[in-house]
Amino acid sequence: MRFARPMARLSLFLLPLLAIAAPAFAKDSLGIFEYWGAFRDPAAPRCYAISLPVGTRGNGFAAVGTWPRRHIRGQVHFRLSRTRAEGAPVILSVGERRFPLVAGKGDAWAPGPRADAAIIAAMRSASSMSVQTQGANGRAFADAYRLRGAATAIDAAALGCARLR
């Protein structure tokens, strides 16, 4: 019975994740790992590890994607929970490390493959991360993510697309 309550809370967290991720990103579930899920769309082909921010409402998410046909592996992407002010910097904090991101109005990415790899390496050893910027309303905001399960979901997504070309 010790697991019933945590599993119920986890299910409440993952139901919105599945509602967002499954139709928008993938057709096949590769697994749910703590606060992260892994999905595959063999028609594209593409695979993602994805999570929702803690305690925010909106359409925000963090994802690490693989597109075999484009030779893209481990690309970090954030959908911000709010619209970003034009020109406002976007900073990702993973544990003690800080990474500047390239951003549009509602999305942010690492500036390149080396930054993607550094971010993923930091995610593997940290317990949380957050993306901070200024909203279109002029107020600062941050989307925070739990990283338990992230490494396993990232690996599952990479393996899910390993043989797809």
Image (cartoon, rainbow, N blue to C red):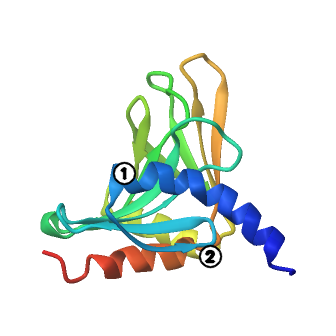
**Image coords of residue 95 (percent x, y):** 67, 63
User: How packed is label 2: few (under 14 Cα within 10 Å), some, or many (20 or more)?
Assistant: some
Q: Residue visible at 61% across and 54% down?
A: 93
SS type, badge 2: helix
Q: Quadrant where the N terminus lies?
A: bottom right
Going by the image, does 125 lie left or right of 162?
right
- The answer to which of marks 2 and 1 sits earlier in the sequence is 1
Answer yes or no: is residue 96 visible. no
Answer yes or no: is residue 45 visible. yes
Going by the image, does 52 lie left or right of 107?
right
Q: Nearer the viewer, residue 68 or 38?
A: 38
Going by the image, does 94 lie left or right of 42?
right
Going by the image, does 7 lie left or right of 81?
right
Q: Quadrant of residue 32?
A: bottom right
Mark 2 vs mark 1, CA separation in Å:
30 Å
Q: Please name the residue that numbered disc 2 is placed on.
A: 125
Q: Residue visible at 15% across and 63% down?
A: 70
Kind of residue at badge 2:
Ser
Q: Quadrant of residue 156?
A: bottom left
Q: Nearer the viewer, residue 155 or 37?
A: 37
SS type, badge 1: helix
Quick one: which residue is furthest to the right in this view?
2
Q: Please name the residue that numbered disc 1 is placed on.
A: 23
Q: Nearer the viewer, residue 160 or 76?
A: 160
Q: Are marks 2 and 1 in contact (CB under 8 Å)?
A: no
**Image coords of residue 160 (percent x, y):** 32, 78
User: How packed is label 1: few (under 14 Cα within 10 Å), some, or many (20 or more)?
Assistant: few
From the viewer's perspective, is residue 16 above or below residue 84?
below
**Image coords of residue 82 (percent x, y):** 54, 30
Kind of residue at badge 1:
Pro
Q: Quadrant where the C terminus lies?
A: bottom left
